[in-house]
Amino acid sequence: MRNILLVALREFTNTARSKGFIFGLLLMPLLALIASVMIPRIQHSVSPQVRGAVAVIDPSGRVTTDLAAALTPSAILARRQASARAAGANDQVARYAANASDVPQLEVIGRSADADVQAQKDWLLSPKGTSPEPLAVVVIAADAVTRRPGAADYGTYDLFVSPHLNAATEGTLRDALRQAVIGARLKTNGEDAAMIDAALRLTPPEPAMIDPKGEHKSGRGVMRALPFICGILLLIAVMTGGQVLMTSTVEEKSSRVVEVLLAAVSPVELMAGKLLGQLGIGVLMVGVYLGISVVALVQFSLFSLLNPVLLLYVLVFYVIAYLVYGSLMLAVGAAVNQLADAQSLMGPIMILLMVPYVLTPVIGNAPNSHMSVALSFIPPINSFAMLARIASDTPPPLWQVLATIVVGLASAAVAVWFAAKIFRISLLMHGKPPSITTLIRWAREA
Amino acid sequence: MTLAVDIRSVSKSFNGTRAIDGLDLSIPEGATYGLIGPSGAGKTTAIRMIMSILFPDSGTLSVLGQESALAAKDRIGYLPEERGSYRKMRVGEFLTYIGRLKGRTRSQCEARAQRLLRRLGLDDVMQKKCEDLSKGMLQRVQFVAALVNQPDLIILDEPFSGLDPLSVRLMKEVIEDEHGRGATIIFSTHVMAHAEELCQQIVMIDKGRKVLDEATAGLRRQYDPRRILLAPLDPGASLDALKKLPGVQDVTTGPDEALIMLAAGTDPATAIRGIVERVAPARIELARIRLEDIFIRLVSEGVSEESRQQLRTHLQGLST
């Protein structure tokens, strides 16, 4: 036991002190912070204000005025805010949407109904510096407002744009055209356009969740993302520990220090120490991430939505997943002489790791489907599947959780047994790297 | 007599190839044993089995009174042939780690490592990273790692390969000191001269089999064919008269010197006096048999002269 702890301590301190680990440990929360703070700001950040002119050829004579009205800054702002709310955005995002400083200043220039379209297209190619800058030409179809006799559908419009027109302003122009053309159609038919618009608008409210702790209006989105967040946390922690185990074993083997170590410790002690040391690294990593998550939830007053037992389950399922995947990666490290040789053996392990990770959001959305329940008991997917189910809106019954833990521990024991066999046989072997079938044969013969 | 290592009828095969074949070996505590033989003879496999790094297919083995070296690892120092270190680790940290794995305290390890490093001319490397040392320096550090736990049994597999003569001399002195304090030393080499100089007992292995297990002192007596080397003062002098000398069995002439073989029971001193009376010598001496001669004689019966010469070159360590 003394030797196992000494090997584990060396593994732990060696990894924890490395710049790569410290950088990796901080990178993940940093990226999450940047994503949570920056993405809404980037999406709704103030762009340089677009100024220019839109020429309209309107044979109906009923669209141009409404289009000019729909392109006033106040009308553009109102439309932005309404569409943000309709998309379910919260107050913060809606506030960004209502930022007036990047609303385009568009001048609508009415052209005569028989204006030459080609000349208008040429106008879009006016030299730089022309004021106002030509941005778009809209040609309203003759039947855009009034249907041709016997026709089921209305006509539409053609839009020609300058290369300098950005996508956001083009979208604004399209929205305004929609409003103006439909408004003109309704007016022509004697309908109250404002009333119909109001009747069609239904702003969805933010749902309030009622649980024994009270009513919660915010944070449902975060809670829905929990299965995915748990999956990515498990993946990163398992990958980090497993990769370090594999590379450090390859390094010990290729630098020939392994025989010096085997003079002091048995192969099983060496393997157990390495597994334990990197387990400590993984627990440290998961602990840091969970700690940061808890602080963030407290900061946004969302902690009450989280079941604290989930934190414990994350650790339990991390340990199980780590022992399964870490043991296999350790066996690969012991079997090869250099990292390049490990790629072919790592392929199947990476697939076994990525498949459950990819499935976590799906399982989180349907936590009690037959498939989700079945996957909770199939190693090595079970840790990811059960954690996603626990983190979902409708967690599984306790007996299923306990059964998954038992299955997980049994699979971890098999993986450690397999790795120990490979480890003992292959540590002093050099030469051609073995295939997967060779590894299995070694494990059976050892 | 207490045995440090006791190997009985041990065999080991790899993929059908027998690396060790029925090896018996008893090494008493406090002895210095040389395990010699050409590369591939099975020396390293035998040592790895003594260390319980490999396990025999058949036979029994005990080390320091234990059935397996695993139970006595804290009392064993081992310098493997394929030795390494943690490149990024500091020397002091590395030696302390190895010493602590063998049951010593940090302070014991540091004190002993410091003392041994100083003896090997490495006074100021404790704080250096292993990757910053030259190959020779690192090899001496690895030698210290084998001794840092003050072991009762020291196993050194080709400890001098690639080292400069000064380092070899310093290491030999340390080995002699360790032996002096009572440690048992097993020393494997394919350079016979090293074994001849350091070991009380020589064990020769060839193709996994023990072909010799003799005390170094008795070895020459047993195998000395009583040969005399003569370099005549006049290179053109006739040596025919020597063939008629009583006790002379044969005279082989070479370009610079002649090898005179004496019959069994002939007194070399009488023979030398007779030779000198007949041929004026520039140099005359008893040709002492070397380990490689014995080894070649033991293993190369029926082998061509060219093969013998290749084996001799190899054993003399000319390739190292």
Image: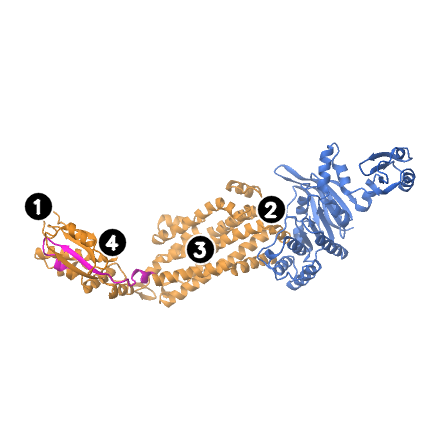
Chain colours: A orange, B blue
Q: Are marks 1 and 2 on the same chain?
A: yes
What residue sits right under mark 3 in the picture? A236
Marks 1/2: CA–CA distance: 88 Å
Q: Are marks 3 and 4 on the same chain?
A: yes
Circle 4 residues within 10 Å: few <14, some 14–19, many ≥20:
few
* Image point (78%, 49%), residue name: B200
Mark 2 element type: loop
Marks 2/4: CA–CA distance: 66 Å
Kindly identify the amino acid type of the residue bearing the numbered disc 2: Leu
Marks 1/3: CA–CA distance: 64 Å
Kindly identify the amino acid type of the residue bearing the numbered disc 3: Ile
- Going from the N terminus, do you reach mark 2 or mark 3 first? 3
Residue A27: name its quadrant: bottom left
Image height of A437 relative to B165, above or below: above
Q: Are marks 1 and 4 on the same chain?
A: yes
Q: Which residues are magenta?
A: A39-67
What residue sits right under mark 4 in the picture? A163
Label 2: chain?
A
Label 3: chain?
A
Q: Is residue A198 visible?
A: no
Of the residues tagged 1 and 3, which is closer to the observer?
A: 1
Kindly identify the amino acid type of the residue bearing the numbered disc 4: Pro
What residue sits right under mark 2 in the picture? A428
* Image point (42%, 55%), residue name: A401
Q: Are marks 2 and 4 on the same chain?
A: yes
Marks 3/4: CA–CA distance: 44 Å
Quarter of the image with the N terminus of chain A is: bottom right
Marks 1/4: CA–CA distance: 39 Å
